[in-house]
Image (cartoon, rainbow, N blue to C red):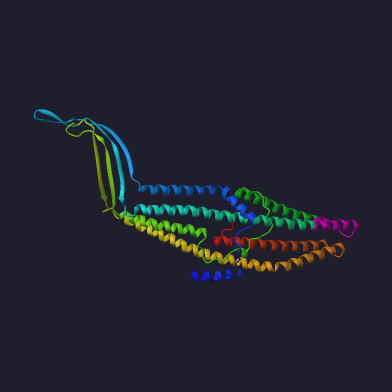
Amino acid sequence: MLRASFIIICSMITVVAGAQSTANKELRSIIESSFTHFPKMKEAENSIAIAEEKKKLVELNWQPEITADAGYAYIKPKIVLPINNQKFQFAPVDNFNAGFNGTMTILDFGRLKAAITQSKNELALSQHNKEYLQHQVAYQVANIYYYIIYLKKAVAIQDTIISALNENKKIIESQVKNGTALEIDLLSINSSMDAEENRKTDLTTMLNKQLILLEYASGIGSSNGTDFDYNITAVPQISNFDINPDLILLNDKVQQSKQDVAISQLKNKPMVNMRASMGGKNGYLPNIYELRFNYMAGVSFSVPIYNGGKIKQQIKLQQTIANQQSLAVESMKQTLDKDVKQNYADIVSAKERLSRAASQITLAKNASQLATNKLKHGTGTHLEVTSANTNLQRTLLNELQLQFQLCTASLEYARLTGVRIW
């Protein structure tokens, strides 16, 4: 069912899929700057370094362990036996011992190999976590970047409306002097201008906040972008979610869980170790005080026989955890499938509404111009002009919002499918 639904969504995307999958040059530069500026990125890089050091540490377990040991012990009472009417001492009071000791695992039946594999899994998880963080930061920066463009364009629309109101104000002032308009008309247009100035102030404040946020994320506090240049045509055709960073991380955790099961199962296997030592020691008969060279070598074999079922229970627990991670992967795939379909529906809706916005804007501009001309010739009123300007403002903002929605929806589509825009 999931596969069939995914094939359907892919077939829809094929029609509109294009070749471009990266953002514009300025946005890519800002995103790349955020990778070195954002503090969390440094944490992710340090996590990779830690994982690499852990992997090296595990691999070193192949090597033997050699120690140099020295000791002294004073032992009382003396071990003395009478032999042929003489006292014969079997052990010295002062005991000296010095030498080198070495141990090495000969056979571990896959324990070390499994541990190395797990350390590689942890390293892969750390690397993929960095890529995941880059993915999230990149799209956060992109959304800030395009929101800044939206606010700049919204401020420009406000400037156009305010400029039109200023022209109308001059007409009203002239008509008031000529006695063809009332003072209330002038007060009314001043009130409209104040309202539009307040909207511009709000938009400017929001713009400044977004610039501060951009600087916080990337270290760059300005943007020269003017167009919503990332849309559905910039998203390549996809066939699966294999490059989605969230899903990659979950798959890494699945591999770790499976490896935990393998490691737990190996605890029932035997161990074969070799031990050797050489050095000098006193206490050897007949001259117990003489330091003499000695050496020892041997092999030990150990195998678990009974542990109260703890290993068996641990294996069962790890298998349950692995199943849980696998279920999380399937849940994530279904969620992504649902989100992609909904996001694609938003894109289609925005494109359809945007295609109808041009005629509405043309009509609103003509109505505004007509109302202004009527006001100039004394056949119209300020209320008609205000109503026409308000409608024009609404249609311009509506087109701007649709363009912004299409851009952000395309970005979200790319984020969900794992596309790199930098």
- Magenta-colored segment: predominant secondary structure: helix
Q: Is residue 380 visible?
A: no
Q: Quadrant of residue 260?
A: bottom left
The residue furthest top is 86
Asked if the stretch drawn in magenta spans residue 289, the answer is no
Residue 339, given in percent of the width and then of the height, sits at: 55, 64
Position of 14 with respect to 380 (left or right) is: left
**Quadrant including the C terminus:** bottom right
Residue 130, given in percent of the width and then of the height, sits at: 51, 52
Residue 17 drawn above or below residue 203 = below
Give the residue at x 54% y 49%: 41
Q: Nearer the viewer, residue 391 or 103?
A: 103
Position of 94 with respect to 58 (left or right) is: left
Residue 420, given in percent of the width and then of the height, sits at: 56, 58
Asked if the stretch drawn in magenta spans residue 168, the answer is yes
The residue furthest right is 178
Position of 379 with respect to 258 (left or right) is: right
Q: Which residues are magenta?
A: 164-189
> How many callouts does the rendering have?
0
Q: Quadrant of residue 19?
A: bottom right
Q: Nearer the viewer, residue 345 or 183?
A: 345
Q: Nearer the viewer, residue 385 or 331?
A: 331
Q: Nearer the viewer, residue 32 or 294?
A: 294
Residue 346, given in percent of the width and then of the height, sits at: 61, 66
Position of 78 with respect to 334 (left or right) is: left
The residue furthest left is 84
Give the residue at x 39% y 59%: 320
Give the residue at x 72% y 64%: 395
Q: Is residue 138 visible?
A: yes
Give the residue at x 46% y 62%: 329
